[in-house]
Amino acid sequence: KEHADKFGYLLVQNYEGRIVPINTQALDVLRKLYKRDKFKGTDGKYLTAEQWFLSINTDTPSWTMVPLIKVDAKGGEELLRKTKADEDGYTSLMNLFPSDGSGNLTYILDADYNTAFRKKPAEQSEYDKQIIKLNERVQIFNEFFSGQFMRIVPVKNDPNHTWHSWLDQKMEPDMESQKVMGPYFAEALQAQKTGDWSKADAELKKLSDYQQKWAKAVVPSETKVNLEVFINKADINFKLLIFYTIIGGLLLILGFVELFKPNKTLNRIIKGIIYVGIAGYVAHFLGLIARWYISGHAPWSNGYEAIIFISWVGISAGLMFYFGFGKPSLGKKTLDSTVKPVKKGNTSNALIPAAGFMVAVIMMGFAHGGSALDPQITPLVPVLKSYWLIVHVAIIVSSYGFFALSMIIAVISLVFYIISDKNLFKVHNDSTLKELAIVSEMSLTIGLFALTVGNFLGGIWANESWGRYWSWDPKETWAFISIMVYAFVLHMRLVPGLRSRWAFHVATMFAFCSMVMTYFGVNYYLSGLHSYAAGDPVPVPAWVYIGLATMFTLALVSYFKFVALKKK
């Protein structure tokens, strides 16, 4: 393990051409193959990603017999049976390529894969999808035989800064690279037998020095490499997801308890939890800065990064309204036209920061959940190599955090109507509920302003990149639709029949669907310059139907309770 840790700092050129520490490469490949960050042996002991990566690259044939390839249970019992997966859902490469008796190896899922691949995405069953994903993992494993994950030798004086393994780009033996990396692998193999890693350490140092000498123009600094390895090992975003779940859950529960039985001790506990949450919020911010420093570009250039940034903005909005605004009045044109101006100051409403932390829980839960996005740091595509990435995308994505905060506040308010009785409603209708509505409206205002400005700035960037300001691209169109939706929600207060808080919260809750469509739906259902759709839409995921059903149920039940409370 000690040597593997040192090995993790050696540099390698990945598929995108980025120079990364072996630690990053090992984690990326292990996650794709094994779906975990560590490998669990049959003896119950764990190998770190670096230990596993060094072992499989020095003895690939032995690893073909190890249950390493993940077979998702979603494919059903038939897939698990065909692949001879173990109780944890793993199979070996040799299970997938059994011998026919004459020495020929046959891929047992070849016919199933061809059938699944020919189907349109909308026609593919869950079995077909898992067959395709399993085939991708098989292809990844096969790359070990050609050394494509071990491109650790810089080609001398190459203007394109290409790195090779023991094979070159044409899959031909590279004798120069073999001379450089061969001594290290020889000593690593010998050390596995003797347990003496001193010579392997020395050869590793020589290999690292060779990289620094012949690729000094592209190798990252030692500080950057150390930071990337630290970020990988810390896995801060996943830990923050757990942390925010605890903080947000406690604040929600205690916030509702405080409404029923307020006391000073409970209020102090709530404030203490908020300050503990701020510590995680600061770590979250530092993680974003570290990712920016490592990648060399703003940390909102792909789906995973954008969601992590939206999470941070959501918490920022909740804390901002909790500490900065107190109980302000927006004047006669607010939802509550009878509100009189009150002195600004810190609010005691714990539900506001709780809503901010719950934004992060939902967003980061999506990033790390069943449809987990790839946390891998990727290089920018040419069109994104612009200062507009910082300006336009940051402003647009920030608006999502404010809209999400309003959506969570809406859910909290509707739940309050459902669980409230007439006495509790009477006490909090002109205080807590009014404050939540005003904060939600302020959040929507900021979000709408940011989305609108961001859309105009996007037009300027589009003119620079593509020679036109607007082309009714799906992303542009849905951003415009979202602007109209939220503009309507903010102007509902001017329509007498739509002025109630219940109507406002329900509209706010459903309005967020337009943001989900703008951010996720366009990417996968509508092809355009801003999206990744291939043309054939994929089936609508189950969480969409579950979410809509939940919102309709919440709106309907809260309506009858709200009407009854108003009458009483």
Image: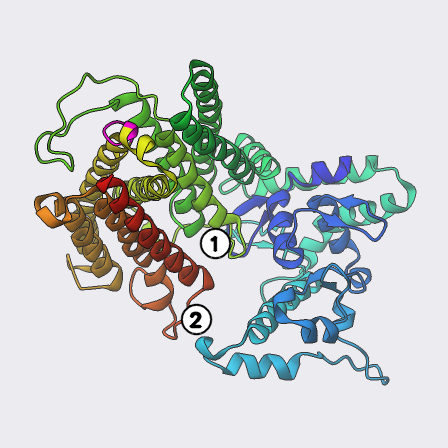
Query: Residue flagged by tag 1: what amino acid is it?
Result: Asn
Residue lying at the far front in this picture: please name it.
Answer: 568
- Give the residues drawn in magenta, as a range: 427-432
Residue 337's place in the image compared with 559, above or below, is above
Q: Quadrant of residue 170?
A: bottom right
The question of residue 429 being in magenta is answered with yes
How is the protein colored in the picture?
rainbow
Q: Is residue 347 left or right of residue 466?
A: right
The question of residue 546 being in magenta is answered with no
Quadrant of the image for the C terminus? top left
Question: Residue at position x 62%, y 81% from top?
Answer: 112
Q: Is residue 296 visible?
A: no
Q: Residues within 10 Å of mark 1 (few under 14, many from 20)?
A: few
Position of residue 110 measured from the top left corner of the image (x, y, whole percent): 65, 81
Position of residue 405 measured from the top left corner of the image (x, y, whole percent): 33, 39
Q: Quadrant of residue 94?
A: bottom right
